[in-house]
Image (cartoon, rainbow, N blue to C red):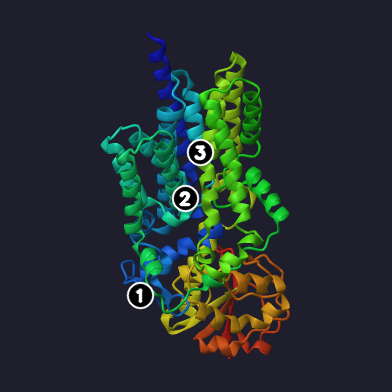
Amino acid sequence: MSFGHLNNRKEKVYLVTGISLLVLFLSPLYLLGEDAHIRIHDNMDSNLAWYKVLIESGQVFGDVGSTIPQVINGLPRNAFGTEFSGIVWLHSLFPTMTAYALSQTITRLFAFMGMYLLLKKHFITNNDAAVIRVGVALAFAFTPFWPSGMLSTLGYPLALWAFLNIRLRDYSWKNWLTLILLPLYSSLVLGFLFFLILVSFIWLYDLILKRDLNLLFLTSIFLMSSIFLLVEYRLLITMLTAVEEPMHRIEFISSRHDFWHSVRLSIKNFFLGHTHVMTIHTVIIIPVLFLTLGIILFRKKQKQDKLFIFLFVLNYGLSLWYALWFNKMWGPLKENIELLVTFNFARFHFLRPLVIYLSFAIACMILWKMKKRWRKFVMIAILAQLIVLIPFNEEIHYGAYHKTPSFKEFYAEKQFNEIKEYIGTPQKSYRVASIGLHPSIAQYNGFYTLDTYNNIYPISYKYQFRKIISKELEKNASLKKYYDEWGSRCYIFVDELGKNYDFRKNSTKKIENLELNIAAFKEMGGRYFFSALPIVNAETNNLQLVKEFNHLESAWKIYLYQTS
């Protein structure tokens, strides 16, 4: 039996083990169902409710100019993104939690497969290094990515595998099919725009330094870009046509940092990462990268060493770019170029998961080629990284550690159904707003809300809604800045509560000095407030406590207030 055959058998064992561990990692979502604990921030407080609202509105394929009346008396349909997205299809076909579990499975399986194929074909080609290929691919698939991003970042390795194959004149249908299908389960603005720019630089590198025009490689970049533009046609039309009603994003103010603030932020991002592209690389990967850098700086450079150094520099460069995007130096340009305000170009740092885990794999390969004891070190490092990632499994991280509400407890469907039945009139006949809890909960349960959390909505509505909370904003400079200079959370902000929207039923806090403009609220159709806390001075706000709602399966105690 040849050594090659032995290694092949070992690699298959590693692959089966890796897939089995990935299935185990995903199993709580299927075993617990709606009792599972998942991310709230930019997930249950927004996206999951958005999908349900969109689907139940009947406007999945709505016209570009259509609106969704359930949110802010008419949220533009375009605020919910394209209908040609796989995650929208999942939520159309399955209950929310089932769709979420399937989306997690699709994303993590393709992340694992993509990184494995990329390493095996292009970077870790040694027959005896299967443990690096499979181990790093599994670690990459374990990373706590932003759920609604789908394959927007975790799909990079699979796309890069296909692009590099075509670059090497491998024109297999598998490569082209990969580039055609990935846009259907990822987002251009949430990741792939920056990746396609990176791949374009690879083509330019070949053209300038190697004098290689490689038209089919260039064609592949145009192909994927074109499909993304077709899928994201709503975004394209919005950008290319004159919009009568400007969106609230034109008032974003982000460039406030001085130089040293930016330097500190770049270092923080380099070592700790970012919530939307968490890589959990601080404890294990960073020391391995610095160790490898130290070793190769004192030896004659090899081809893989140069690639590692390039990736190391690129890694920090992306963090520096992220930090500098919020620097004051951009102020004059952002004042004159609207695109620089409305579009977040800091997201080039979304490339970091690919760069970090590819660097980790190459570092492991460099060490693997050294003396025998280094192979044990590499295996320990990969195992340690997997162990470090396990606590970031959603059920462990959010359920056992942070003790956040489960999906069922958060959306509290039975409790809000009781509220709906108690009110007794069609939900579309009145408007509500929430205090001390996310409006996504009311939206998920079919209520028509004046408050919301959305990336895009008319700026005129921002001004109109502000009248309701103006006195509360004047009490709190932080909330005022948060609303006026960002405003995507169009919430009933209360000075006494700050940016806390998670007051559960065991809370003993009371709202003592609420000052809302109820006349403005009623003018917009508002009739009820769902408050997670009792309002002591409700009468001075012309509010009447109608009923308290509590439910065993809910995280909240809801105080239903009606305008008088």
Label 1 and label 3: CA atoms lie apart by 40 Å
Amino acid type of the residue that numbered disc 3 sits on in the rendered structure: Phe
Q: Which mark is residue 65?
A: 1
Kindly check if marks 3 and 2 are in contact, taking CB atoms under 8 A apart as contact.
Answer: no
**Residue 531, above or below 94:** below
Label 2 and label 1: CA atoms lie apart by 28 Å
The secondary structure type at the circle numbered 3 is: helix
Residue 411 appears in view: yes
**Of the image marks 3 and 2, the number of the one nearer the N terminus:** 3
The secondary structure type at the circle numbered 2 is: helix
Quickly name the residue at label 3: 140
The secondary structure type at the circle numbered 1 is: loop
Badge 2 local density, few (<14 within 10 Å), some, or many (20+)?
Answer: many
Q: Which mark is residue 442?
A: none
Kindly check if marks 1 and 3 are in contact, taking CB atoms under 8 A apart as contact.
Answer: no
Quarter of the image for residue 168 reads: top left
Q: Name the one closer to the observer, 507 or 323.
A: 323
Quickly name the residue at label 2: 194
